Image (cartoon, helix red, strand yellow):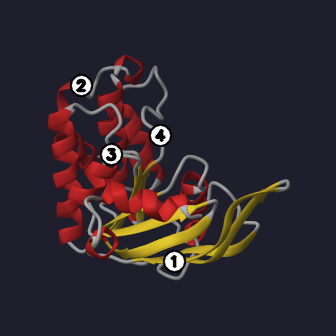
Amino acid sequence: MLITLERLTKTFGSTVAVDGLDLEVRPGRVTGFLGPNGAGKSTTLRMILGLDRPTSGRALLDGRPYAAYSWPLRKIGAVLEAKAAHPGRSGRNHLLAMARSNAIPASRVDVVLEQVGIAGAARKRTGTYSLGMGQRLGLAGALLGDPPVLVLDEPVNGLDPDGVRWIRELMRSLAAEGRTVFVSSHLLSEMQVTADHLVVIGHGRLVADAPLDEIVAGHASLEDAYYSLTSVR
C-alpha cells in the first residue's frame, strides 16, 4: 500500500510548516524520514493520519485519505507519541478499546502484547510504565489491526540497547513482508543500519528522496551526507 503526498502544504498563519511536498512511500522497504527540528516532519505525519488538515494538496493511502477508511487501524498503524494512553487504564484494556473501535477480535490484543514483549505488564496501569514500555505499548497498538502500513515517529526513544535492536529487526521484518514502513528519526546512525530508502526535508520542502546507498555515496557516513544536504538549504 502506497503513501502518496501530492503538493502537500500546511501553513500556520504566516508560517509555512510543509511546503508542496510530492512524495511516494513504497511498500517492501523501510523509508527513513529525516530533517532538522522544525523541518515539518511531525506535521507531515499528522496530515497523513488525518490529525491535521492540509492547507492545500493531499495525503493519500492507496489513493484514499485516511478518513475515508471505515476501519483505519486495519490499514495503517502509527506511533506518534510514546505513552499516549490513559494513565489509569491497563495496557490490555487500552488495546481492547482500540480493538473494539475497529472491529478487531479481542484475541489479537494478546498476540500483539506478546509480540512487543510486554505481556507480563499487560494488566498494570499505563501510568506506571516506563518510557520504553510506553513505546512498546504504542507499537502494540500500531500492530493491532495487522496493517499494511506503519508510520512511526522516533520509535526508539526510551528503549535500551536490546530494545533498539529489537525494533530495528521488527521494522526490517515488517518491510520484508511487503509492508510500507515510514519512520521518522533523529538518530542518523540508527537509520544508516535500518533504512533502505531516505526522505530528507528542510524548511518544509523536499531535499532528498533516494535509496540510502545513493545518499551516502561519496560521504564517510550518513551523518556527513545529511549535514551536507541540510546545510545548503
Report which quarter residue 90 is drawn in: top left
Q: Do the residues labelled 1 and 2 touch (CB within 8 Å)?
A: no
The quadrant of the image that shows the C terminus is: bottom right
Marks 4 and 3, the one that precedes in the sequence: 4
- Residue sitting nearer the eye, 88 or 161: 161
Amino acid of disc 3: Leu
Real-space CA distance between mark 3 and mark 1, rounded to the nearest whole angstrom = 25 Å
Residue picked out by circle 3? 139
Q: Distance between the residues labelled 1 and 2?
A: 39 Å
Secondary structure under the numbered disc 1 in the rendered image: strand
Answer with mark 4 or mark 1, whichever residue precedes in sequence.
Answer: 1
Position of residue 79 in the picture relative to residue 139 (left or right): right
Q: Which of marks 2 and 3 is in front?
A: 3
Residue drawn at 53 percent across, 82 percent down: 63
Numbered disc in front, either 4 or 3:
4
Is residue 41 depicted above or below 157 in this figure? below
- In the picture as drawn, the residue positioned furthest to the top comes out as 128
Q: Nearer the viewer, mark 2 or mark 4?
A: 4
Residue wearing tag 4? 81
Residue beneath disc 2:
121
Residue position for label 1: 23
Tell me which numbered mark, 3 or 1, is placed earlier along the sequence: 1
Q: Are marks 4 and 1 in contact (CB under 8 Å)?
A: no
Earlier along the polypeptide chain: callout 2 or callout 4? 4
* Residue 18: image location, x then y, percent: 66, 63
| Marked residue nearer the N-terminal end (2 or 3) | 2
Please state if 17 lies on the left or on the right of 3 as rendered: right
Q: Give the spatial CA distance, label 2 vs label 4.
A: 20 Å
Q: How would you rate the neighbour count of disc 4 (Cα within 10 Å): few for under 14, some for 14-19, many for 20 or more?
A: some
Instruction: State the CA–CA distance, disc 2 to disc 3.
Output: 15 Å
Disc 2 secondary structure class: helix
Kind of residue at badge 1:
Leu
